[in-house]
Amino acid sequence: MRKITIDCAVCGERVALEHGKEAMFETGSNAYHLMDLCPSCLDTQLKAAETVNDTSGYRQKAAAMIKLPGAAVPSVRN
Ligand SMILES: [Zn+2]
């Protein structure tokens, strides 16, 4: 079986698809910013979130729907 990896949109770490998580950040009413996150970045965003819901994913079965204070989007680390 082919091993599929994704690059975390925040820290750039390459993780196996099944360990990554799609996160949809609410940026407005019915506006979302989709990012693939590694487990540790997802954890950070979940702690910062105002609200978190699960929703159907775009590529994956489930995505985290996250609203950050001020409808912010995570900044990308270098
Ligand atoms: Zn990451």
Image (cartoon, rainbow, N blue to C red):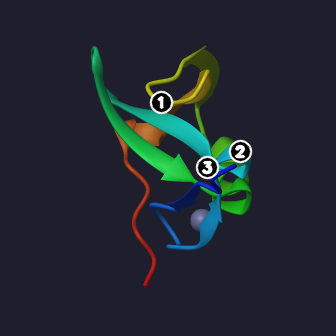
Q: Distance between the residues labelled 1 and 2?
A: 11 Å
* Amino acid of disc 3: Gln
Above or below — where is 32 with respect to 20? above
User: Residue at the location (58% across, 73% down)?
Assistant: 13
- Is residue 42 placed above or below 10 in the rendered structure? above
**What residue does disc 2 label?**
18
Residue that sits furthest to the front in the current view = 1
Where in the figure is residue 36, as x and y percent of width and height? 50, 49
Mark 3 / mark 2, whichever is N-terminal: 2
Residue 68 position, x and y percent, is 49, 39
| Residue in front for this viewpoint, 50 or 40 | 40
Q: In which quarter of the image is the C terminus?
A: bottom left
Distance from mark 1 CB to nearest ligand 1 atom below 8 Å: no
Query: Closer to the N terminus: mark 1 or mark 3?
Result: 3
Disc 1 crowd, CA 10 A, few/some/many (<14, 14-19, 20+): few
The residue under label 3 is 45
Q: Do the residues labelled 1 and 3 touch (CB within 8 Å)?
A: no
The residue type indicated by label 1 comes to Arg
Query: 55 or 4: which is nearer to us?
Result: 4
Q: In this view, does 28 lie above or below 13?
A: above
Q: Mark 1 points at which residue?
A: 59
Judge left or right: residue 2 versus residue 72.
right
> CA gap, disc 1 to disc 3?
20 Å
Looking at numbered disc 2 in the image, what kind of residue is underneath it? Glu
Q: How far apart are marks 3 and 2 (CA)?
A: 18 Å
In this rendering, would 22 be left or right of 29?
A: right
Secondary element at image label 2: helix
**Of marks 3 and 2, the one in the foreground:** 2
Q: Residue 16 lies in what quarter of the image?
A: bottom right
Secondary structure beneath label 1: loop
Q: Which quadrant of the frame does ligand 1 lie within?
A: bottom right
